[in-house]
Image: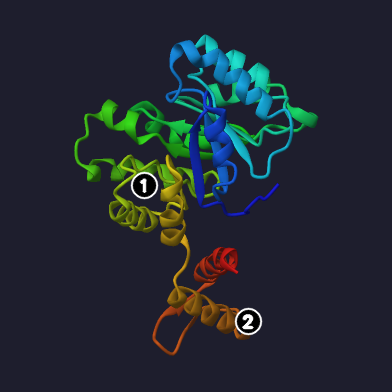
């Protein structure tokens, strides 16, 4: 299995289309997200679960996460019971989480493969979920990440312009950091033809503190990766910072007038860790 320590791309695919899932596994995405919820019609839920169980009965070349059905639905319990013990499952994405108790219940009730806790990821898709962001992020050691589901959140809030979601986005980034989780990935960009708009949106997300993005089509993957990989100038700056820190570990000013301290050094390390993906 190819596992990137800092994944940047997460590709959603419908669980009732095994042929599409097979293509996703060789698409170059860092993680493949098999969706049993929104992408699957009600009369296809059982088939999607069975097809996904067959896929996950053996290890896959890239991590495979599954977005199960809404936790208050009868489908969710069947999803969790069927898929949790399977060796090919790398994570469960829980939709529409609004309280830490939901995460705890899944973490404690879901059977695990090999006795270890299954990595969980909570999707916050309502105003209540966003308000509970830190409590959810800190709810259980099995929770590895949180993220927004912006389509549902937009509808819940009655937001029209994209800027109306920025407060919620910042809230989730801060909550993840405060809970010691990795930075969240951006929600999907729904127009698969508008690659320029996707690039601009990713650049904005990067300024807010996101790391990587979920996608709904393979053509979006290289755009997302380019947007989140450091530029040559950023790499050069990071190398300069680490060289200076190795000489003098205390706070100091560089010849160009920029100031470095332990926080800046930590950022430089992450920049170079991302740069290593390229080579």
Query: Quadrant of the rendered structure where residue 103 is?
Result: top right
Residue 225 is situated, as x and y percent measured from the top left of the image, at 47, 57
Circle 2 Cα neighbour tier, 10 Å, few/some/many (<14 / 14–19 / ≥20): few
Circle 1 Cα neighbour tier, 10 Å, few/some/many (<14 / 14–19 / ≥20): some
Q: Is residue 125 above or below residue 178?
A: above
Residue 180 is situated, as x and y percent measured from the top left of the image, at 56, 47
Q: Is residue 39 left or right of residue 77?
A: left
Residue 68 is situated, as x and y percent measured from the top left of the image, at 54, 24
- Tell me the residue at 54%/41% (across/down): 24
Image quarter where the C terminus lies is: bottom right
Query: Quadrant of the rendered structure where residue 192 is?
Result: top left
Q: Which residue is situated farthest in the right direction here?
A: 114
Residue 72 visible in the displayed image: no
Check disc 1 and report the residue beneath it.
Answer: 170
Q: Which residue is situated farthest in the bottom direction here?
A: 255
User: Dot 2: what SS?
Assistant: helix
Q: Nearer the viewer, residue 210 or 37?
A: 37
Check disc 2 and report the residue beneath it.
Answer: 246
Q: Is residue 197 above or below residue 114?
A: below
Q: Is residue 73 above or below residue 2?
A: above
Q: Which mark is residue 254?
A: none
User: Dot 1: what SS?
Assistant: helix
Residue 39 is situated, as x and y percent measured from the top left of the image, at 44, 25
């Amino acid at each position: 299995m190819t596992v990137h320590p800092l994944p940047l791309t997460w590709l959603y695919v419908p669980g009732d289309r095994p042929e599409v899932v097979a293509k996703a596994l060789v698409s170059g995405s860092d993680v493949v997200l098999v969706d049993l919820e929104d992408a699957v019609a009600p009369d296809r839920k059982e088939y999607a679960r069975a097809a996904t169980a067959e896929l996950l009965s053996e290890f896959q070349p890239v991590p495979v996460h599954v977005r199960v059905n809404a936790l208050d639905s009868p489908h969710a319990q069947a999803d969790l019971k069927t898929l949790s013990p399977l060796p090919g499952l790398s994570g469960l994405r829980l939709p529409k989480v609004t309280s830490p108790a939901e995460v705890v219940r899944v973490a404690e009730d879901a059977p695990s493969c090999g006795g270890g806790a299954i990595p969980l990821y909570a999707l916050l898709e309502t105003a209540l979920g966003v308000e509970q962001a830190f409590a959810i992020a800190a709810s259980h050691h099995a929770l590895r990440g949180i993220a927004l589901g912006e389509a549902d959140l937009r509808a819940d809030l009655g937001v029209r312009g994209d800027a109306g979601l920025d407060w919620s986005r910042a809230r989730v980034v801060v909550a993840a950091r405060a809970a010691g989780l990795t930075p969240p990935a951006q929600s999907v960009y729904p127009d698969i033809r508008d690659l320029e708009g996707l690039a601009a949106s990713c650049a904005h997300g990067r300024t807010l503190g996101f790391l990587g993005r979920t996608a709904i089509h393979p053509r979006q993957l290289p755009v997302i990766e380019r947007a989140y990989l450091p530029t040559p100038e950023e790499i050069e700056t990071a190398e300069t910072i680490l060289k200076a820190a190795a000489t003098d570990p205390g706070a100091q000013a560089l010849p160009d007038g920029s100031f470095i301290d332990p926080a800046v050094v930590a950022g430089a390390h992450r920049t170079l860790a991302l740069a290593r993906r390229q080579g």
